[in-house]
Image (cartoon, rainbow, N blue to C red):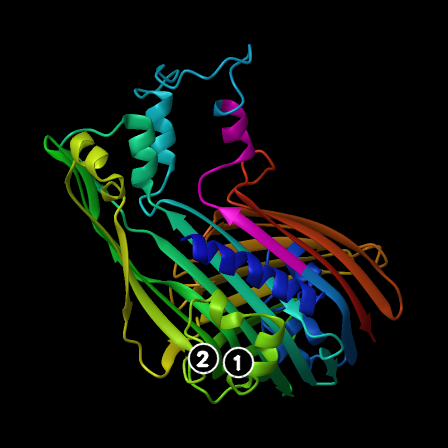
C-alpha cells in the first residue's frame, strides 16, 4: 500500500509538471455536466461530437487554458468533521457514546452507519491537455490530453475495530480497493449536418502511460481465545505503456420551437493493451528512465522485456498472542509477498458512458438544460447508477453569463454547481465550482474546480 501511495503522488507530479493545462470546459462544469445538447466547438468533444455540426453558432474554437481538478471521498464532510472531530461546545472531546436526540442510536453507531460497506474511499481526478493541440474548425476537431484517475478504499473493518474494539470471535473483512490510471489520448472528431439533425463521431488513439491496482482482495481478521488470526490477501497488478483506441458516437436534433434533444455514447468501443513492447514508452524506456525511474516506481523488473508485473501480498496469522509475539516480534505482522505470473499483454476495456439530454431556450434570456446519464461499466470514472442533472444559464447579458445546476444519483448521490464568465468577441473566460456528495459546502464530500480560456469565433 505504501508503494501505491508513492506511485499516486509521483504520477500526479509527472502529469502536472509535463502538462500544465487541461482540456475541460468550465461552462459544462458550471452546468453540472448537463451538456449533451448545449456544448459547442471544442467543448463538444467528450460530450457529444454531433454538436460540431452547429457551425452557424461556432466556426472556430481553440483552448488556451482549461484546468479541472476533482477531489472526493464517500464519508467525511465539513459539517461531520466540525460536529465530531473539533470537540463539543466547550472544546472537550465529543462523547460518542451518548444517544442521538430523536434517534434510537448513539453517535458512534451513527458514524459507523455513514461509512459504506466498501469502506472509506477517496480519490483524485485530473484532465489535462497537450498545449496547442486542441482546436475545432467548422465541423471538424482535433483534441489531445492526459487523463488521470485514482481511487483508494480503506476497509470498513479498521473503523469498526477502532470504535467498537476487537471483540473475541468476530471476523472483520479485509477487502480493499485501489486503482490508478494514466492515459494520453489523441482524437479526431467530425459531425455530418443534415436538415433536421446532426450525427457525429470521435475516433481516439489511447496511449497508456501506466496503471496500477488491486484486482482481487479479501480474507478476514479476528481475535480468538488463543490469539490473533488472519488470512488477508490482495493481488496488486501494474503495467506501463499501452496502445488502444476508443470511439464516441453522437446525435442531436436541430431546434424545434426552441427545444433541442441529443444523445451520445462515449467509448462505445474502447480498449487498451498494456505491458507489451509495441508502444511509445516501451520503445523509449531508456530515455524515459534517464529522467524518471518508471519501472522501479511501479515495482516492475528492469529487464528490458518486462513492462508489467503482479504481486500477491498475504498476511497469515494463526494463534498469535503476547507470548508468541515476545518470543518473535516479527510474527505479529507477518506480511508476505510473492510474484504472480502475468500475460505479456493485459487488455483493459475503457469505460463507456451513455448520455441523453434536452434544452429549451427562452428568447435571449436563459437556457434550461437536463441530462440523464449512466456508465455502461462500473469501474474507474464510470458508474452504472443513473444520474440526472438539471441546469440553467442566464444569457440576457451575454458578456457575463451566470450558470448553475444540480444533479441526483450517479457515484456521488447529489451535486451542485455554480459558475460565470466573461465573453468578448473573440475570447471567452469561464470559471466554475461543483460540489460532490452534497448541496452545500458544509455537506459536500468533494469538490471540482474548473477554469478555461478559449478563442472562439
Along the viewing direction, whichever of 218 and 32 lies nearer the viewer: 218
Label 1–label 2 contact, CB within 8 A: yes
Residue drawn at (45%, 87%) of the image: 277
Q: Earlier in the sequence, mark 1 or mark 2?
A: 1
Where residue 48 sits in the image (x, y, percent)?
A: 58, 74
Where residue 101 sits in the image (x, y, percent)?
A: 39, 15
Quadrant, the C terminus: bottom right
Q: How many marks?
A: 2
Gap in angstroms between the C-alphas marked 1 and 2 = 9 Å
Secondary structure under tag 2 reads: strand
- Residue 73 falls within the magenta-colored stretch: yes
Is residue 109 among what the camera can see?
yes
Residue on which the image places disc 1: 206
- Residue 328 falls within the magenta-colored stretch: no
| 373 horizontally vs 141: left or right | left
320 w.r.t. 131: above or below: above
Residue on which the image places disc 2: 270
Where residue 85 sits in the image (x, y, percent)?
A: 50, 25
What is the span of residues highlighted in magenta in the rendered image? 68-83
| 429 horizontally vs 221: left or right | right
| 436 horizontally vs 346: left or right | right
Q: Residues within 10 Å of mark 2 (few under 14, many from 20)?
A: many
Q: Choose top left, top right, bottom left or bottom right for residue 36.
A: bottom right
253 w.r.t. 83: above or below: below
Secondary structure under tag 1 reads: strand
Along the viewing direction, whichever of 101 and 36 lies nearer the viewer: 101
Where residue 362 sits in the image (x, y, percent)?
A: 72, 59
Amino acid at each position: 500500500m505504501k508503494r501505491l501511495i508513492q506511485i499516486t503522488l509521483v504520477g500526479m507530479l509527472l502529469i502536472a509538471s509535463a502538462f500544465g493545462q487541461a482540456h475541460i470546459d468550465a461552462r459544462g462544469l458550471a452546468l453540472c455536466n448537463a451538456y449533451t445538447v448545449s456544448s459547442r466547438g471544442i467543448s463538444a468533444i467528450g460530450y457529444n461530437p454531433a454538436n460540431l455540426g452547429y457551425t452557424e453558432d461556432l466556426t472556430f474554437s481553440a483552448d488556451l487554458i482549461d484546468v479541472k481538478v476533482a477531489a472526493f471521498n464517500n464519508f467525511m464532510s465539513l459539517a461531520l468533521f466540525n460536529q465530531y472531530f473539533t470537540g463539543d461546545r466547550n472544546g472537550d472531546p465529543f462523547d460518542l457514546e451518548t444517544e442521538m436526540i430523536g434517534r434510537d442510536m448513539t453517535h458512534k453507531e451513527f458514524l459507523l452507519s455513514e461509512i459504506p460497506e466498501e469502506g472509506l474511499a477517496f480519490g483524485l481526478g485530473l484532465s489535462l491537455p497537450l498545449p496547442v493541440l486542441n482546436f475545432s474548425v467548422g465541423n471538424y476537431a482535433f483534441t489531445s490530453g492526459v487523463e488521470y484517475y485514482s481511487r483508494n478504499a480503506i476497509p470498513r473493518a479498521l473503523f469498526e475495530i477502532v470504535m467498537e474494539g476487537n471483540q473475541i470471535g468476530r471476523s472483520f473483512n479485509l477487502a480493499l480497493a485501489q486503482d490508478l490510471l494514466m492515459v494520453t489520448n489523441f482524437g479526431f472528431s467530425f459531425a455530418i449536418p443534415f436538415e433536421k439533425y446532426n450525427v457525429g463521431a470521435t475516433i481516439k488513439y489511447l496511449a497508456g502511460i501506466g496503471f496500477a491496482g488491486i484486482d482481487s482482495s479479501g480474507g478476514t481478521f479476528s481475535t480468538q481465545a488463543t490469539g490473533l488470526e488472519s488470512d488477508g490477501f490482495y493481488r496488486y497488478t501494474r503495467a506501463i505503456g499501452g496502445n488502444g483506441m476508443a470511439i464516441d458516437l453522437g446525435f442531436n436534433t436541430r431546434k424545434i420551437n426552441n427545444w433541442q434533444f441529443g444523445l451520445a455514447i462515449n467509448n462505445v468501443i474502447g480498449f487498451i493493451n498494456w505491458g507489451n513492447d509495441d508502444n511509445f514508452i516501451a520503445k523509449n524506456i531508456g530515455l524515459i528512465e534517464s529522467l524518471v525511474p518508471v519501472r522501479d516506481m511501479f515495482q516492475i523488473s528492469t529487464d528490458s522485456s518486462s513492462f508489467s508485473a503482479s504481486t500477491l501480498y498475504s498476511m497469515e496469522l494463526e494463534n498469535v498472542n503476547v507470548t508468541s509475539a515476545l518470543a518473535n516480534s516479527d510474527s505479529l505482522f507477518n506480511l508476505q509477498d510473492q510474484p504472480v505470473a502475468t500475460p505479456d499483454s493485459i487488455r483493459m476495456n475503457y469505460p463507456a458512458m451513455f448520455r441523453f439530454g434536452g434544452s429549451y431556450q427562452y428568447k435571449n434570456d436563459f437556457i434550461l438544460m437536463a441530462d440523464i446519464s449512466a456508465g455502461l461499466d462500473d469501474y474507474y470514472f464510470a458508474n452504472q447508477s443513473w444520474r440526472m442533472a438539471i441546469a440553467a444559464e442566464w444569457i440576457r447579458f451575454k458578456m457575463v453569463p451566470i450558470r448553475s445546476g444540480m444533479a441526483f444519483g450517479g457515484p456521488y448521490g447529489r451535486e451542485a454547481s455554480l459558475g460565470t464568465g466573461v465573453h468578448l468577441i473573440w475570447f471567452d473566460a469561464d470559471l466554475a465550482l461543483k460540489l460532490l456528495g452534497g448541496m452545500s459546502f458544509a455537506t459536500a464530500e468533494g469538490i471540482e474546480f474548473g477554469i478555461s480560456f478559449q478563442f472562439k469565433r
